Image (spheres, rainbow, N blue to C red):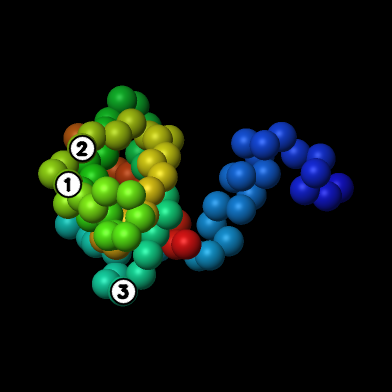
Amino acid sequence: MGLRHYTGEEASNAGLGQGGMTVLTGAGQTTPAGETYIAFKTVSGGGTSTIQVKWTSSPGFGDSYTGTNADFASGDIVYGNFSSIEFDAISAGSGILICYKG
């Protein structure tokens, strides 16, 4: 079965992660310097916990931004052009932050 047998969303998801990824497993961890990331996904250990993420977008593609903390539910995916992503905190339990390189 080739890629043409998938829906647009499934085909897009198949491409995400092909450039590699960095997985942050706890609060205070940050992606390594010198990498460019195209998306991040939050995954919490369950319940209604939220993960706080702080990021810096890369200049030259869209608006440049250095963010304050934003809360995301488990399973949220944020797309952009990021030069730095930080797992800032989790409201309860445990979680991971998957940062996709691109």
Q: Where in the figure is residue 40, as x and y percent of width and height?
A: 39, 48
- Amino acid type, residue under disc 3 in the picture: Gly
- Amino acid type, residue under disc 1 in the picture: Gly
Asked whether disc 1 touches disc 2, contact meaning CB atoms under 8 Å apart, the reply is yes
68 or 72: nearer the eye?
A: 68
Asked whether disc 2 touches disc 3, contact meaning CB atoms under 8 Å apart, the reply is no
**Element carrying mark 2:** strand
Q: Residue at x 17, y 46 (%)?
A: 67
Q: Residue at x 40, y 35 (%)?
A: 76
Report the residue marked by disc 3.
34
Q: Where in the figure is residue 31, as x and y percent of width and height?
A: 29, 64
Q: Where in the figure is residue 25, as x and y percent of width and height?
A: 32, 55
21 or 34: nearer the eye?
A: 34
Direction from residue 3 to residue 69 in the image, left or right: left
Report the residue marked by disc 2.
70
Figure check: 4 above or below 71: below
Q: Is tag 1's residue or tag 3's residue first in the polypeptide sequence? A: 3
State the CA–CA distance, disc 1 to disc 3.
18 Å
Answer few, some or many: residues within 10 Å of disc 1's Cα (few below 14, many 20 plus, some between 14 and 19).
Answer: few
Figure check: 83 above or below 97: below
Any mark on residue 67, and which?
1
